[in-house]
Amino acid sequence: MIHKRWFQTIVAGILISLLILLLHEIQFFFEPVFTYIGAIALPLIGGGILFYISRPVLHFLERYKVHRLIAILIIFLLYILLGFIIVQFIAPIAQQQFTRLINNLPGMIDMFGDTISYWQQNQDIIPSQFDSTINNVVENLQSYLQDASKIIINVISQLIGFVFALVLIPFFLFFMLKDGDKFVPFIQKFLSKRAAKSFGKLAHSVDHTLNAFILGQMTVSIVVGLLLLVGYLIIDLDYSLTLSLFAMLMNVIPFVGPFLAVIPAMLVGLLQEPILALWVAIIMVIAQQLEGNFVSPNVMGKALSIHPLTIITLILAAGSLAGFLGLLFAIPTYAVLKAITTHFYEEWLERRKETHD
């Protein structure tokens, strides 16, 4: 019986459950490790993202016989130039529009409430349940506004701590660009020939997955943001730059990002001129169609190979467990785990085949 597949599966499940229980009981032992990981998480992740963005430029410069240290210096200068352009030309306009949006928010909410009240007074076909829901929203608009202000203040206070962690990102990026390709050979020196080959293949698979996701999502977000900015400017939507920057940020979140991105723009369009809300929706659909048919297939291809239903499930679960960070990292984490699992499964099949042969 012990050789039966079902029996081995049950035993494996029990052992995994006991391992999880044991880890839960001794979690105090790992607290210093978690504290250390939490301290370096942001610089490590930020440096890693910039590493994948910068690596194609590094390889391009090295192809033309530019020394690696000089190439890294050029990359840092390009980042400084990009930061200067953003601070000098983009940030003032975005800040001005964002300030106007915040200042006009109470008036926009009052206008929204007046619109709903007018609609209620002139419509006799609204179901009673829907009518009570509208009344509840109107009555609590002020409290919603106050809560939104508290959230904004809380976000600003967290951003202050966030800025301090950002200072370490350039140091992580420098050493990743300088010595990143030495990590795998360094580990392989301590492994057997077969294990070293397997580790190299696994590292390449994980690297390919992360590269496809990071460069893909960044490219998709920038392209969608630019398309929306052009569309918003054409229809003369208020706060067009701020709304397109928000859409660019939200598009980093796979699948649900585009839906989150369009909500503020539609609300602004609805209050500015109701027909604009329809135009915003049309612009978003056009941008998503262009992105889905031309940008994503060429940038990401089928590197991740994740079913849309799996993406929805992962985002719902990760969002409820870890909030916004869960939404950001659910898909790349799953893609990496999938690459690792696939690698070891293929290794197992190869060894099984060799054994039978």
Image (tube, rainbow, N blue to C red):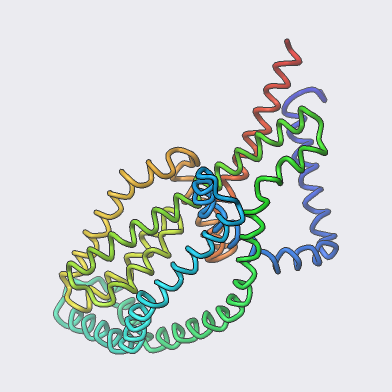
Query: Which quarter of the rendered picture does the C terminus lie within?
Result: top right
Q: Is residue 42 visible?
A: no
Left or right: 203, with 151 as reference point: right
In the depicted view, which residue is nearer to us: 209 or 323? 209
* Residue shown at 77% from the left, 42% from the top: 187
In the depicted view, which residue is nearer to us: 7 or 272? 272
Q: Position of residue 248 (x, y in %)?
A: 38, 63
Query: Which quarter of the rendered picture does the N terminus lie within?
Result: top right
* Residue shown at 44% from the left, 67% from the top: 82
Left or right: 112, with 20 as reference point: left
Question: Which of the 4 image quarters holds residue 103?
Answer: bottom left
* Residue shown at 73% from the left, 16% from the top: 354
In the depicted view, which residue is nearer to us: 312 or 217? 217
Against 47, residue 115 (above or below) is below
* Residue shown at 18% from the left, 83% from the top: 118
Left or right: 176, with 274 as reference point: right
